[in-house]
Amino acid sequence: MILDDLKAFLIANNLATSTEIKFDFDSSNTNCVTLWNYGSVPSDLASRPTIQIQVKNLNLATARTKIQAIYDALYPKEQFQKGILINNKLMHIKPNQEPFFNEKDASERYCYIFNITVTTNR
C-alpha cells in the first residue's frame, strides 16, 4: 500500500519515527504525522491516489520545519517533473498545494497540511 511506502520513506529519511506516523485522524495529544488517502484520480494504467499529509506539533516552529522538510523530500527541486524511488517503486509525486497552516487543535497542537497526488504502477 502506498501509505506504508510513504511511512517507510519518511522513517528512512529521518523525517518521522514509526510511533509518530498515524494512518487516521489522530485525537491523542502527542506530536504526530498523519497520512491518509482521501481520493484518487481514475486511470487504467496506473494507480493515482490523492494523499493528505498532516503534521501536528505542540511547538509551532517544529511543526513548520517538519512539514516543509517532508514536502521538500517528497518533491525535491532537482527532481522536478521526474519520479523518485520509494521502497524500490518509481513514484511521481505531484503536489496539489504547498504546506499551509490548518488549525490549532483542541490539544493545542499546531496543524500543517499539504496534499499530493502519487502516480505509480498498479
Image: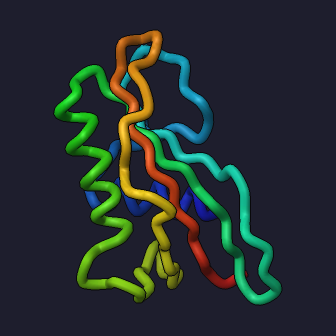
- Across and down, in percent, residue 3 comes to 58, 56
Identity of the residue drawn at 44% across and 43% down: 113
Depth check, front residue: 1 or 45: 45
- Would residue 98 be found to the left or right of residue 91 on screen? left
* Residue farthest left in this picture: 61
Q: Based on the displayed image, in which of its 4 quarters is residue 45 positioned? A: bottom right
- The relative height of residue 93 versus residue 111 in the rendered view (above or below) is below
- Quadrant containing the N terminus is bottom right
Depth check, front residue: 8 or 56: 56
- Across and down, in percent, residue 110 comes to 34, 25
- Would residue 99 be found to the left or right of residue 43 on screen? left
- The relative height of residue 42 versus residue 71 in the rendered view (above or below) is below
Identity of the residue drawn at 17% across and 33% down: 61
- Quadrant containing the C terminus is bottom right
- The relative height of residue 57 versus residue 29 in the rendered view (above or below) is below
Identity of the residue drawn at 45% across and 50% down: 114
- Across and down, in percent, residue 94 comes to 49, 72
- Across and down, in percent, residue 36 comes to 61, 47
